[in-house]
Structures are given as C-alpha cells and as structure tokens.
Image (cartoon, grey):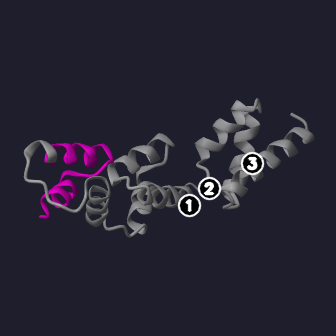
Amino acid sequence: MTDPDRKIIIDAITRMLARREHSHVEVLTKLTQKGFDAGLSSAILQEFTDADIQSNARYAEMRVRACASKGQGPARIKRELAQHKLDDATIASAMSEADIDWFELALKVKEKKFGEDQERDFKARQKQMQFLNYRGFTQEHIQYAVNGD
C-alpha cells in the first residue's frame, strides 16, 4: 500500500472516532466494508490504540451507560459487548464503573411498561417477568421488580 492509502485510512478512522467511541472490531469491520486492506487497516488502528485514541475500555463504558439508559439489563449488555469481542475483564470493569443500581432500573423499566401497580394475576406477572428477562435482567432483579422483594 502507498502513503496516500495510509492517509485515507487514517482519515477514515479519525472521522469514525470523532463521532463516537467504537470498538476495535467495529472499526476494522467498517474499514474492511469500505474496501480498505485489512492488514494495513489493522496496523494503523493499532497505532490509534497505542496512542489511546481508540480504546475498548472507553467504548465499553459508553455502551454500558447507553444501554442502561435504554432500560437494558446487565446480561443483555454483557452479550452485546461480547459480540464486539471485548475481553471479560474489560466488560466487568465497565459494568462496575457504571455504578448502576440494576434492581431500581428493573423496577423503573417494569413501571414504565406496565404501571406502578403490583399485579396479583399470575399471567400478568409472568408477562412482566418475560419482558424483564428479554431486556437482560437477572432473576434477582426480576423478582425485586415484579414482587417488590
């Protein structure tokens, strides 16, 4: 590859990272889709990572906050971060640094969808539990939100 190709890749990475944080895998995928050489793209992206311009840790923290603000639970967020090939330590660090009360978030999500009343009907409670499970909350969070325990 030539020097102009290198500059084009650098510009593309800079534009991506200027908009929002991206994971390492996400940037490489986008560059490959645009037709850039995977080897050169990977080498240049590694320079960005070494200079702490691209950071998987910052990306993970941003995704945890964004997903939690959309009412998603910890299990769903962890699955999404794992799809971006982030290591378990980075995911665990981002989850703990977010300082989110998952129990209260589950309750808030349940109340937004179903109202504040505690359902006594088994089918209605089952529906709430399935909804919260789909959103990625654990059984403890779901029990707290549905039963008030």
Mark with earlier residue (1, 3): 3
Q: Total marks drawn?
A: 3
Q: Secondary structure at mark 2?
A: loop
Mark with earlier residue (1, 2): 2
Where does label 1 land, which residue? 58
26 horizontally vs 109: left or right:
right
Query: Residue placed at 66% from the left, 55% from the top?
Result: 49
Residue 112 coordinates in the image, percent (x, y): 32, 58
Mark 1 and mark 2 in contact? Answer it, CB < 8 Å: yes
Query: Residue placed at 20% from the left, 47% from the top?
Result: 129
Query: Residue placed at 14% from the left, 59% from the top?
Result: 118
101 horizontally vs 90: left or right:
left
Quick one: label 3, few (<14), some, or many (20+) residues within 10 Å?
many
Mark 3 and mark 2 in contact? Answer it, CB < 8 Å: no
Q: Which residues are magenta?
A: 125-149
Q: Amino acid at mark 1?
A: Arg
Q: Which mark is residue 21?
A: 2
Q: Amino acid at mark 3?
A: Ile
Mark-to-mark CA distance, 3 and 2: 11 Å
Which quarter of the picture shows residue 104? bottom left
Residue 24 falls within the magenta-colored stretch? no
Q: Is residue 141 above or below residue 31?
A: below
Q: Amino acid at mark 2?
A: Glu
The quadrant of the image that shows the N terminus is top right
Quick one: label 2, few (<14), some, or many (20+) residues within 10 Å?
many
Where does label 3 land, which residue? 13
Q: Is residue 66 above or below residue 34?
A: below
Residue 127 coordinates in the image, percent (x, y): 20, 43
Residue 139 falls within the magenta-colored stretch? yes
Q: Secondary structure at mark 1?
A: helix
Which of 2/17 is in front?
A: 17
41 horizontally vs 78: left or right:
right
